[in-house]
Every structure is written in C-alpha cells, then in structure tokens.
Amino acid sequence: MDTVVVACKLPHGMHLEVRNPAGMVEKRVTINGARLKTSATGRELNTHETTDDFGKGYGLTFNVPADFWARWSKENADYPPFARGFIFAQDNPVEAKAQAREMSDLQTGFEPLSQSKLPGGLSKFDPKN
C-alpha cells in the first residue's frame, strides 16, 4: 500500500475525514500538530516527530494511505488550513521536511508570543507572584 507523510503546522493537529454520499464517516486519520505534547511538569513527551520545537515547524504523521490523502485533499481543496499550506503531504520524510523548511516562515496565528516584545498590557509570567 502506498503511503504519504502528512505535515501539519497547526499546533493541535486534527482529524481528517472522508465521508460517503450519506454523510457518514468512511475513514478518519488523525494527524499530528506542530507542538510537542508536554507533561504537567512541562517536560516534552516524545509522542511524535516535528520539524521544529518552537512554533515554526510542522508535526509529521507517517504512513497515511495515499488514496485517503488524494481523496481528502481533492474534497477539501478550499479548506483554508490546507489551501494556505498549513497542511500538506509528500511521498517521503525527506521531501516533507524539505518543504516544511521552505515554508517555516508561514504564520498560522498560533505562534508563541515573543517574551521580549509582548503586546501592550501584557507582562512576563512571574511564577513568584
């Protein structure tokens, strides 16, 4: 079976679904988001691979069936996260990582705030207060 590597720049990842004509879900694939999961103590849990840990990268999901991806991408061509490049697929990890590097400056709006340039009215977190 042919597979692809799906890359997702959204921090939370998402479920991709294809439906039959009656609207029932035929198949669902959960793709990884860009943020590594952390434990309650803030330690990273290596639950999936990302191309960058600090908000510029993509979460990678391996072994997504190519026929599912072809159908989903055709049916969702106008879906804004897909159309804007926040979700894409490549045939192998090397190509997926190369495209992710090329698109690393793409902004989703979910990027972490810069601690040196906080918007007005916000201050740095101080755990002592």
Image (cartoon, rainbow, N blue to C red):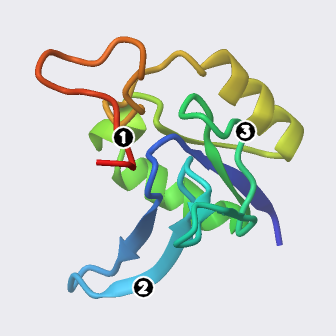
In this image, 47 relative to 39: left or right? right
**Label 1 belongs to which residue?**
126
Q: Which of marks 1 and 3 is nearer the N terminus?
A: 3
Instruction: Tell me the number on the disc at residue 26.
Output: 2
What's under tag 3, amino acid-wise?
Thr
Q: Mark 2 is on which residue type? A: Glu
Residue at 47 percent of width and 20 percent of height:
106
Where disc 3 sits, the SS reads loop
Q: Residue 51 carries which label?
A: 3
Crowdedness of circle 2 by 10 Å Cα count: few (<14), some, many (20+)?
Answer: few
**Residues at badges 1 and 2 in contact (C-beta under 8 Å)?**
no
- Can you give x and y, in whole percent of width and height, for residue 94 in the image? 88, 37
Instruction: Identify the amino acid type marked 1.
Output: Asp
Q: Residue furthest top?
A: 117
Residue 86 visible: yes
Residue 78 visible in the current orientation:
no
Mark 1 vs 2, N-terminal side: 2
Measure how far apart labels 1 and 2 are at the Cα level. Answer: 48 Å
Q: How many marks?
A: 3
Earlier in the chain: of badge 3 and badge 2, it is: 2
Residue at 25 percent across and 79 percent down: it is 21
